[in-house]
Image (cartoon, rainbow, N blue to C red):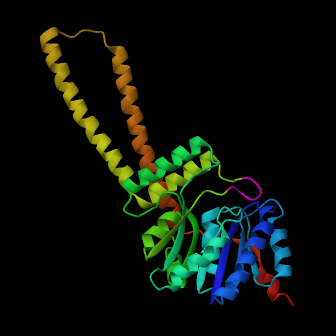
């Protein structure tokens, strides 16, 4: 039984040795308790620090370590996809390098899969202790919004940290779309999932790479990728304003017939024009988001490009 640990890394030079030490400890315990072998796949997402050098150093110490290095920063979604493609294990686990995803949960997660009742073991945070309040608020609002707008189940507080059977891994890889939102993809492919909850854990080292703007863009990816509700909202707003315009036309005609045609009222006219223009631009923006995703999909560009990998190193004479 081989378990592949996939670790997307972007500027994680400080955290990588700490993660490896903890993951190797858990792997040693699981080798005794479950008879499991491990491989560690570090996906360097175009880091600008010594992340790649740290992965190579770990590779020199432990031949279970493999690494992939992108030609530039392609994003975490591309790193997840690349790691899943490279995984050779009967089971594959996704973990962050900062130890916010505790490897100590892996034995329980594997037990759930070995029971035969589940195909995937996933994790969710019950608290957001340590995060800025504003960020936590918007995160909760995002999960509430997408839960109502999408038919795909996306659990509040869900992490990318999960252990999957080969069947689930193959199903995820079969979705070759360019615009990826893994939390939605995991929910869309289905399969029986066992959820494990834990409290938020602070980073072991380094700084978060997720700014508020990046998280906002990521949330837009999720909504556009797994719901057409924004298009329905845009259409509904258009219909609402058409009805409102007809009502206002009737009102103006009646007022003119009864009271004449006063020249006052230009401030309210300006406000109405600005409001209607704003709604029109909003609807055009919603359409633009879907059109942009379609444009990127039809170009069929690869999700990532490799600069080097441990496989290249093995092929050298």
Q: Nearer the viewer, residue 277 or 32?
A: 32
Which region is colored magenta? 202-207
Q: Is residue 252 left or right of residue 205?
A: left
Image height of 283 relative to 71, above or below: above
User: Which of the 4 image quarters holds residue 236?
Assistant: top left
Residue 117 sits inside the magenta stretch: no
User: Could you tell me which residue is drawn at 30 percent across and 9 percent down?
Assistant: 264
Q: Position of residue 241 (x, y in %)?
A: 28, 35
Q: Nearer the viewer, residue 158 or 178?
A: 158
Q: Does the image show residue 273?
A: yes
Q: Does the image show residue 180?
A: no
User: Could you tell me which residue is drawn at 17 percent across and 15 percent down?
Assistant: 255
Q: Quadrant of the C terminus?
A: bottom right
Q: Is residue 282 left or right of residue 238?
A: right
Residue 205 sits inside the magenta stretch: yes
User: Could you tell me which residue is drawn at 55 percent across and 78 percent down?
Assistant: 164
Image height of 67 relative to 141, above or below: below
Q: Nearer the viewer, residue 205 or 313?
A: 205
Exactly how many numbered labels are in the figure? 0
């Amino acid at each position: 039984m081989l378990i592949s640990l996939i670790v997307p890394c972007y500027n994680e030079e400080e955290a990588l040795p700490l993660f490896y030490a903890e993951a190797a400890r858990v792997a040693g315990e699981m080798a005794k308790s479950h008879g499991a072998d491990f491989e560690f796949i570090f996906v360097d997402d175009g880091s600008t620090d010594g992340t790649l050098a740290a992965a190579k150093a770990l590779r020199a110490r432990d031949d279970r370590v493999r690494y992939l290095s992108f030609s530039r920063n392609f994003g975490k979604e591309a790193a997840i996809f690349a790691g899943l493609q490279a995984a050779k294990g009967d089971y594959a686990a996704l973990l962050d390098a900062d130890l916010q995803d505790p490897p100590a949960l892996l034995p329980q997660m594997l037990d759930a899969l070995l029971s035969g009742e589940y195909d995937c073991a996933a994790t969710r945070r019950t608290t957001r202790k340590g995060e800025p309040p504003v960020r936590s608020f918007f995160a909760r609002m995002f999960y509430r919004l997408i839960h109502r707008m999408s038919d795909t189940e996306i659990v509040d507080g869900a992490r990318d940290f999960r252990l999957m059977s080969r069947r689930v891994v193959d199903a995820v890889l079969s979705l070759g779309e360019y615009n990826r939102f893994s939390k939605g993809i995991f929910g869309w492919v289905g399969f029986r999932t066992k959820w494990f909850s834990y409290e938020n854990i602070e980073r072991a080292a380094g700084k978060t790479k997720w700014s508020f703007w990046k998280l906002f863009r990521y949330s837009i990816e999720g909504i556009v990728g797994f719901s057409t509700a924004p298009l329905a909202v845009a259409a509904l707003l258009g219909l609402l304003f058409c009805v409102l315009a007809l009502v206002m036309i009737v009102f103006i005609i009646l007022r003119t017939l009864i009271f004449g045609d006063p020249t006052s009222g230009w401030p309210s006219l300006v406000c109405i024009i600005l409001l209607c223009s704003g709604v029109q631009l909003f609807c055009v923006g919603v359409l633009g988001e879907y059109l942009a995703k379609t444009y990127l999909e039809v170009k069929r560009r690869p999700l990532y490009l490799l600069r080097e990998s441990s496989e290249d190193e093995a092929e050298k004479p």
